Image: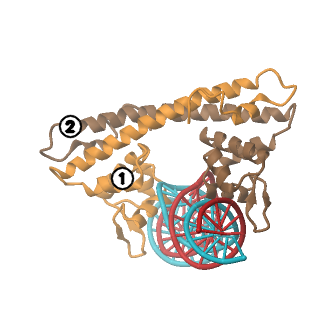
Chain colours: A brown, B orange, C cyan, D red
Amino acid sequence: MFTIGELSRRTGVKVPTIRFYEDKGLLPSPERTAGNQRRYDKPSLDRLQFIKHTRDLGLPLADVEALLSLEGARGDELDRAHEIAERQLADLRDRISRLQRLESELARIAAACDGQHDHVCAVLHAFGDHDTCSGSH
Amino acid sequence: MFTIGELSRRTGVKVPTIRFYEDKGLLPSPERTAGNQRRYDKPSLDRLQFIKHTRDLGLPLADVEALLSLEGARGDELDRAHEIAERQLADLRDRISRLQRLESELARIAAACDGQHDHVCAVLHAFGDHDTCSGSH
DNA sequence: CCTTGAACCTCTAGTCACTAGAGGAATTAG
DNA sequence: CTAATTCCTCTAGTGACTAGAGGTTCAAGG
C-alpha cells in the first residue's frame, strides 16, 4: 500500500496530477484510510506507470484512455490499439519534419543579427519576412 | 482599409484570434466605422503577419510581444532580440531530438502487434513497458 | 500520551492559445 | 429595399495540468 506521495515518487507523476487523473476517470478511486487519505496498491502503480509512459510519448489523454479500456481485450478489438499506435507514429513523424523545417529557418534568423548592430536588427525583419523562408508553413 | 475578415484572409489568422490578439494588447485597437466595426491599415497587416510568422515558428506569445516591443530599438536593446532567437533555436533542437527518440520507440510499439493476435496484444504491454525503451525520458 | 511538522484533503482559479456559440447589429450586392 | 453575409460583444469550453487557500491526518520523537 502506497500513499499518494509514494506513488508520485515511484512514477514521477506529480501529486495533483494523480488526483487529476482520478477525477478524469483514468485512475480508479483507490481505497481510503479512516482519515480519508488515499492508499494505492500495485495494480494502481502499474496503471499510472502506463499512463505516464504513454503521456511521455505524446499521446493525448483520450488515446491513453482508449488504450486502457482495451486491457484484456482480444481479437478484433486489438486492432484499435494497433491503429492508435500507427496514427500516433504518423503524427509524430509529421511533427518532427515540420520542426526540422522551422529549425533551419530559426538558425537563419539567429545568424542574421550577428556582427552588424548599427541599424535596425535583422532578426526583427527576418521574423516578419516570410519570403526568405526555405519551406512553406 | 481592411475589414477584420479581409485581414484574416490575407494573413491566415482566424477572425476570433485577431480579436483575441487585440485583447492581449499584441495588436493595437484599430479605427472603427460609425457602426462599430474594425477597419485596419497596412501597418496593422504587417504587424499581424509578424505575429503569425513568429507563432508558426513556435514562439510563445510572451516572446512575440517582447520582439514587437523592440521595434525601432537599437544597440544593446537588440541583444534581447538575438537572445530570444537563440533561446528558441536551442529549445527547438531539444524538442526535435526528444521527438526522434520517441519516434523509434513508437515504431517499436507499433511493430509489436503485427502478426500475432491470439493473446493479449503486445502493443498494450509495450506501451507500459519502460525497460525496453532505447532512450530515457 | 502529546506535540510537531510533513504530508495529506477539497476546492477554486489560473495557465496558454485559442475556439465555439449565442444573440444581435451593420454592411453590401442585387 | 431586402436578403445574405459579415460583423459585434460576451461567455464558456478545450487540454493537461499547476498553484494556492484553508484545513485535516499521520508518523516520529520526547
Q: Classify residue B136 as left or right of residue A34.
A: left
> Helix, strand or loop at disc 1?
helix
- Res. B100 in view: yes
Residue A132 sits above or below residue A68 on the image? above
Chain hosting mark 1: B
Residue C24 sits above or below residue A105 on the image? below
- In the rendered image, residue B24, in percent from the top left (x then y), is placed at 41, 64
Q: What residue type is labelled 2?
A: Asp
> Helix, strand or loop at disc 2?
loop
Q: Mark 1 points at which residue?
A: B63
- Res. A129 in view: no
Q: What residue type is labelled 1?
A: Asp
Q: Classify residue A92 as left or right of residue A34.
A: left
Q: Which residue is drawn at 16% across and 51% down?
A: B74
Q: Residue at x 32, y 43 (%)?
A: B85
User: Where is the C terminus of chain B found, in terms of image quarters?
Assistant: top right
Q: Which residue is drawn at 44% across and 31% down?
A: A100
Q: Which residue is drawn at 87% across and 25% down?
A: B118
Specify the quadrant of the image occupied by residue A16: bottom right
Residue A114, labelled with which disc?
2
